[in-house]
């Protein structure tokens, strides 16, 4: 094919069979372009299972397109880097442009501002028009979100969520919400109690086929130093598998999802959660399919309103909301650091080695599965990082590296904004800060930990609690006038009335923060000077450009 009409770009998180970029595709004149590339595999230090998920899903999508009679120009990575025909995204695309000589580039809106800029630059460099089409995967297009946001002084999820419910007629009877309430949060905060979870349903697993096994072999050989491993990879990587995973959730876990969605317990991996976020964010399944299936379960009496509404709110509300915020606030959003936090991500967030039971258990799930449910992310790993003062961009980069479902549009607002309050209140009006008491209420972690969640000082002081009071103390000027933090500020003032106590908290917190800065275990033996130097060298090697 000497010349083609459209070179249709399909990215790794756009694996939708109804992708708008494929509209009016002419098999005689158009070619799909897809590329596995080193830039996207290494710009953050990706978990091995995350690499397997993206590349395996992409290769299966390629097969599906070819079965439909579409020509696909596909760049695959190999186990041996010496066989690479190009490493960078734009290098591979430029080579394809020179070889295929298209008249135009076509794509669907992408999920990463950095990638969009890269594609626009590449198109200009090759004197080609880049046509960008809307992404039909989402309920709310970006222009509609901006129109909604322009009418408000602040962006409030609840307002947006209610507007979406009304517009799309989801869980509505006329103009009223079904169940006579817009949300059922008060019914969705149960803990497992002293006995812990019982009779948890099995989560559907998917055996890797030959295509996925080839990807696993490639990742194991090529990315030996990356965190995690590929053992036990069992995620859906095709549309059929994703639909099966949805049915499994609705049939076996949705009914109890609402009540226990915030509950934590040692060795609990998935609980009653859907484990669909990765398939959703790669467009292997549509949000409408998920919402419709959940609502149908309520209609059929198979799931209660609190579970169904809670699930719907995460998809129709929160997921759409953070996408709108991301594109409205970029590119400046990624540089926000409202609390001027500067620490690196703790060492335990890469290897899971810590005496803190809560962080250790959450990190075991992350390392083993590239997964943690939203309370493990926000109120264990996010909480400790926030209290300690981890740089929000560093936390986002870590989030992008370690979670299989991470795509920039959803990770950045969740990690930098909601979790670390780096945006200063755009996404949430108060930081999600708390002491170890919260973790004790929602889990059994504190009963199996050598630290005492009630203590902020002393040898058995809980690092979460110590750093919580220090976080408030360090940032009091930021929060003194925040109406949602009146109670916390008053409690800090009581601590400040005891000069010896607040001095002891500050001293203990400084020591903890210094250990994080030095790359040491927050709780455990002190590293040698040589080991600290080696850690700093490794950190510099992985340091992103923003640093």
Image: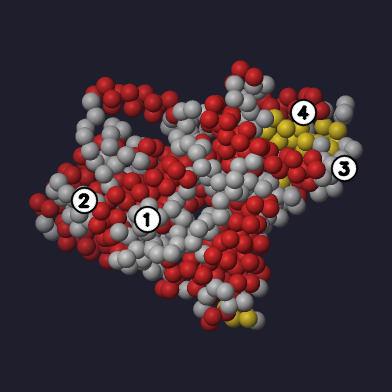
Give how far across and how far down residue 244 sits, in percent: 63, 57
Instruction: Please name the residue shown 59% across and 25% down the image.
Output: 79
Give how far across and how far down residue 468 sits, in percent: 27, 53
Of the numbered discs in the image, which one, if any, rests on residue 60? none
**Could you tell whether 364 is left or right of 303 in the image?**
left
**Could you tell whether 82 is left or right of 481 in the image?**
right
**Could you tell whether 127 is left or right of 389 in the image?**
right
Sequence-wise, which precedes: disc 2 or disc 3?
3
Farthest-out residue, right: 28
Q: Quadrant of residue 53?
A: top right
Mark 2–mark 4 distance (CA, rounded to whole Å): 59 Å
In the picture of the structure, the residue carrying the numbered disc 2 is 451
Circle 1 or circle 2, nearest the eye: 2
Instruction: Please name the residue shown 68% across and 51% down the image.
Output: 239
Give how far across and how far down residue 446 sits, in percent: 26, 56
Of the numbered discs in the image, which one, if any, rests on residue 26? 3
Mark 3–mark 1 distance (CA, rounded to whole Å): 49 Å
In the picture of the structure, the residue carrying the numbered disc 1 is 379
The N terminus lies in quadrant: top right
In the picture of the structure, the residue carrying the numbered disc 4 is 97
Residue 399 visible to the viewer:
no
**Contact, CB < 8 Å: mark 4 with mark 1?**
no
Sequence-wise, which precedes: disc 2 or disc 4?
4
What colour scheme was applied to this rendering of the protein? secondary structure
Label 2 Cα crowd, 10 Å radius (few <14 / some 14-19 / many 20+)? many
What SS does tag 2 mark? loop
What SS does tag 3 mark? loop
The C terminus lies in quadrant: top left
Q: Is residue 130 above or below residue 505?
A: above
Sequence-wise, which precedes: disc 3 or disc 1?
3
What SS does tag 1 mark? helix
Sequence-wise, which precedes: disc 3 or disc 4?
3
């Amino acid at each position: 094919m000497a010349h083609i009409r459209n070179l249709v770009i399909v990215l790794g998180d756009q694996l939708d069979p109804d992708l708008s970029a494929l509209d009016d595709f002419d098999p005689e004149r158009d070619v799909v372009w897809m590329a596995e590339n080193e830039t996207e595999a290494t710009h953050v230090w990706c978990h091995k299972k995350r690499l397997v998920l993206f590349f395996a899903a992409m290769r299966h999508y390629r097969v599906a397109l070819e079965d439909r009679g579409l020509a696909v120009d596909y760049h695959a990575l190999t186990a041996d880097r010496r066989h690479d025909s190009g490493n960078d995204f734009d290098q591979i695309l430029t080579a394809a442009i020179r070889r295929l000589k298209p008249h135009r580039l076509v794509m669907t809106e992408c999920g990463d501002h950095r990638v969009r800029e890269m594609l626009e630059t590449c198109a200009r460099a090759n004197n080609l028009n880049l046509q960008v089409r809307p992404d039909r995967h989402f309920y709310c297009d970006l222009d509609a979100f901006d129109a909604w946001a322009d009418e408000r002084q602040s962006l409030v999820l609840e307002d947006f969520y209610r507007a979406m419910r009304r517009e799309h007629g989801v869980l509505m009877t006329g103009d009223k919400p079904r169940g006579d309430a817009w949300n059922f949060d008060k019914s969705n905060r149960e803990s497992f109690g002293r006995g812990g979870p019982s009779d948890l349903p099995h989560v559907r697993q998917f055996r890797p086929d030959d295509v996925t096994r080839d990807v696993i072999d490639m990742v194991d050989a090529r990315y030996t130093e990356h965190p995690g491993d590929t053992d036990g990879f069992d995620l859906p990587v095709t549309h059929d598998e994703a639909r099966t995973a949805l049915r499994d959730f609705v049939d076996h876990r949705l009914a109890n999802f609402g009540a226990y969605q915030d509950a934590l317990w040692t060795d609990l991996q998935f609980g009653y959660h859907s484990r669909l976020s990765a398939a959703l964010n790669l467009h292997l399944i549509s949000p409408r399919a998920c919402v419709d299936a959940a609502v149908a379960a309520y209609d059929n009496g198979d799931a209660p309103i609190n579970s169904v509404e809670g699930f719907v709110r995460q998809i129709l509300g929160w997921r759409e909301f953070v996408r709108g915020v991301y594109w409205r606030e970029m590119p400046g959003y990624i540089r926000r650091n409202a609390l001027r936090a500067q620490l690196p991500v703790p060492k335990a967030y890469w290897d899971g080695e810590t005496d803190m039971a809560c962080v250790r258990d959450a990190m075991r799930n992350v390392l083993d599965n590239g997964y943690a449910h939203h309370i493990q992310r926000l109120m264990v790993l996010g909480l400790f990082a926030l209290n300690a003062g981890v740089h929000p961009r560093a936390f986002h980069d870590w989030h992008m590296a370690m979670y299989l479902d991470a795509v920039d549009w959803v990770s950045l607002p969740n990690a930098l904004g909601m979790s670390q309050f780096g945006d200063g209140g755009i996404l949430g009006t108060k930081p999600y800060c708390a002491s170890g008491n919260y973790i004790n209420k929602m889990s059994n972690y504190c009963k199996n930990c050598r630290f005492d969640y009630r203590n902020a000082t002393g040898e058995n002081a809980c690092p979460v609690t110590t750093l919580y009071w220090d976080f408030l103390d360090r940032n009091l000027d930021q929060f003194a006038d925040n109406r949602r933090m009146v109670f916390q500020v008053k409690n800090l003032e009581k601590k400040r009335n005891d000069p010896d106590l607040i001095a002891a908290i500050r001293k203990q917190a400084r020591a903890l923060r210094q250990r994080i800065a030095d790359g040491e275990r927050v709780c455990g033996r002190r590293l040698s000077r040589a080991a600290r130097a080696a850690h700093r060298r490794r950190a510099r090697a992985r340091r992103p450009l923003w640093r």
